[in-house]
Amino acid sequence: MNIKIHRGLDQIGGCITEISTDTSRVFIDFGQNLPGCGEPTTPEDDEQMVQAIFSQNKKQHEAVFYTHGHEDHVGLFEYIPDKVPQYMSEGTMKLLSIKYGLLSEGASLKMSELRKQNCTSEEYNDADSNQKKAENKCKLLKRICIWKRTAPHKVPKSIIVGDIKVTPFFNCHSIYDSYMFLIEADGKRIWHTGDYREHGYMGKGLFPTLKRYATHIDTLITEGTMLKREDKCIHERDVSGKMAYVMRAFKYVFVLASATDIERLAAITEAANGAGKTVYVWSKFLKQTMAFFTDQEGELSHGLFSFHPKFYNQRLLKSVKRNGMVMIAGSSQKECINGLINELPQEETLLIYSSWDGYYKDPVQIKVNPMYKEFREMFHNVVDIHTSGHADRKTIEKVIRTINPKRIICIHKEADAEL
């Protein structure tokens, strides 16, 4: 087998890995560049790059596999040639369908509002373009090939692409339904980790999986996001405990967190229950992802991933003022959340910032996406309680020792990061 890293050796995100034989090839991830990582690109640049990659080294059998649903891994799926099958997990496909469905709905509403206003043609055309892009992605997702999560203690089914065999293994990461891959051909075995960690609720299966299946590996392709960072990776249980402690000290608590991170949502919910507070959301995306997680995992997890938040509206303001609350929100909700904050006494109101601190500390990140910093600055009382979705250096070292491959390729890392 031949391995070519098209992108990811010197940047976090935007990953594209090609693995080929004489007759076949598979790609692991086709991701967009993260803001502030790699060269900024336009949609036209992205499409041309994908076309250029597929015009070279053509094979009789080709396919694309996605480790998970973060945009820096799946963001270019719309540009893959129609004849090339694309594979992702059922959970990833459904999460993306929720996301792009809501984006299409939001763009449609925006267009309706603009029609009633004296908007410029540029504003209207932007909204129309956004709706068409979201609708197109929804249509493309219906053609995606999916695999279902393997039941506990069962051997995952492999997918055959020419003479290459790809086997997906469930993985713990800061988004629902993430996977690793074993790729086999020509008597060789490659293990691609995707993004992973051990310190999540679902992370306990990492090393049992590696010990059972990641054997006699010729090449390990591992992520290295945290190699240069000194962040302390605490377990999600500890995140929940820290949150519960501060939730008891404030009547009104807002938590900035991702709608697709099932484990962080569980940590927040457990903390709120421990503090005796009702959980609210004010986002259709959060409402729908939490309902999806509950349907898929609530019973299997014995309630850990069972979510029943109240959907906030202005009629509930009196009840919230009287009883307090925990409100989970995203940075894009800045305007509506600011309106609610103004109704509450600031000395009793707290923001738990539960995202990467680089979004509000790193000047590059602030420049390309100021919403996190702006959201944080709306509050007088703020505390950071977070843990990474990625493996720390010690876990990466343990993975390497456990697999003991003949060679290692490290991707999804900063340019000067070293194993």
Image: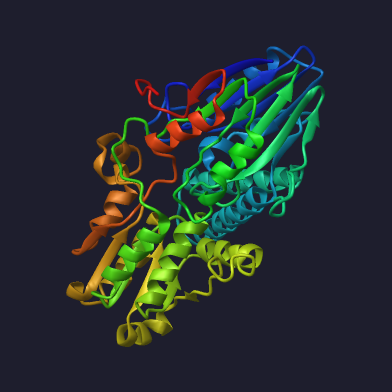
302 w.r.t. 132: above or below: below
Q: Where residue 36 appears, x then y in whole percent?
A: 37, 32
Specify the quadrant of the image occupied by residue 171: top right
The answer to whether residue 188 of the structure is visible from this angle is yes
Residue 243 lies, in percent from the top left, at 32, 65
Q: Nearer the viewer, residue 18 or 198?
A: 198
Percent of width and height locating residue 353: 31, 57
Q: Viewed as shown, does residue 316 lie left or right of 17?
A: left
Position of 411 with respect to 153 (left or right) is left
Instruction: Specify the quadrant of the image occupied by residue 35.
Output: top left
User: Residue at image x 33%, y 50%?
Assistant: 371
Q: Residue at x 53, y 58 (%)?
A: 115
Q: Position of residue 281 (x, y in %)?
A: 45, 70
User: Residue at 21% of width from left, 75% of height from top?
Assistant: 348
Q: Is residue 39 visible?
A: no
For the C terminus, give its image quadrant. Answer: top left
